[in-house]
Amino acid sequence: MATHQQTASLKIAVMGAGLIGKRHIEAIGAERRTALAAIIDPTDAAREYAAGKKAPWFPSLAAALAGGSLDGVVIATPNQLHVANTLEAVHAGLPALIEKPIADDAVGAEIIVTSAEAAGVPILVGHHRRHNPMVQAVKAALETGRLGKVLTAQGTFWVAKPEDYFTVQWRREEGGGPILINMIHDVDLFRHFFGNVESVHAMQSSSARGYPVEDTAVVVMRFESGVLATFNASDAAASPWSWEMTSGENPSYPRQDQICYQIGGTAGSLSIPQMTLWTNAGAANWLERLVKERLPFDAVEPLAAQLNHFCDVICGNANPLVSGREGLETLRVIEAIKASARSGMTVHLKADARREKERLS
């Protein structure tokens, strides 16, 4: 793909004018390097929304391309449309930012990744938290050895979603629960911090609402690095403990002064998002007083940082921070978690990936 020399605002289209699509549209409007070239969504509501924004509206990507050239596209459509939408962008040679998950299953994600790589079209997956400077500060602390050898981590996502959230049918069905909708963000960050996952063991429950989809899940993950981690998720538990409630990343959530992740190592432990590092003054000794330090970072809106990075990707000045393959690997972990929760068995990801490859060959 040829390097794009930016001389004017990059013309970006957004496919899907739902909740997250509208956030991308607002970010494009606020970014000096981008111009909203099209809102692509066949619904009447989207057409009216586009008219209110004084933005060009099209029912399809093909129609938008017929109306003029584009430099990139944000795909914020329902998960089951990601494969078809992304392949259309790839065939048009358009760099794409795909909202998470990259696809609704790993088979579809593999099709996206291999097609984009063959065409030389860059794909950026919308795991936006990796663009948060706080996350980058955590990563730096781990890589520079501030915690010593990292041994373990734990995370919590407990929120109480209101009943009207479930008036949308797909949110009451398989795939609409906190594992795929919410925990995928946390799993992606844990992969970013600790590397690839070797195995998972999970349990899930739907005891709060009785829908076919889970409302609560507990997961144990073993990473290839040796790190052991647990994650506890529920969208039916009223609490202040979740990334959404504690990070301040999305102003829609009332911010709480609590933690959502803890990481423990031989030289210290870190609480997130407080970024409080606890270390021994000298040699490790549980009878000695711990030293408390707050790690600094610059506050930047992650969706804005992600869009800025997407501009660099379009212009050929950066490789995607979250590539299609990264999105695929995170989705494989989520599928392993679901498989383990259904079977009650530990799922080993490498073994499962090898069997899937043999099945498809």
Image (cartoon, rainbow, N blue to C red):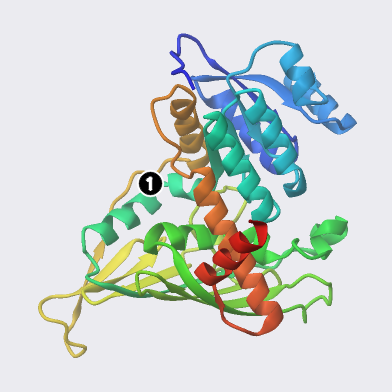
Left or right: 237 in relation to 97: right
Q: Residue 298, position in %: x, y?
A: 34, 44
Position of 117 compared to 42: left or right? left
User: Which residue is more in the foreground, 184 or 327?
Assistant: 327
Residue at 75%, 45% in the rendered image: 78
Above or below for 282 versus 325: below
Vertical relation: 330 (above or below) 87: below
Residue 285 visible, this orientation: yes
Count of labels in the image: 1
Q: Residue at x 68, y 34 (%)?
A: 87
Give the camera-side residue of 263 and 81: 81
Residue 154 point in image, percent of width and height:
45, 74
Residue visible at 89% across and 30% down? 44
Residue matched to label 1: 133
Q: Helix, strand, or loop for circle 1?
A: helix
Relative depth, front residue between 46 and 11: 11
Q: Which of 292/268 is in front?
A: 268
Q: Quadrant of the C terminus?
A: bottom right
In the picture, measured across the screen, residue 135 lies left or right of residue 18, that is: left
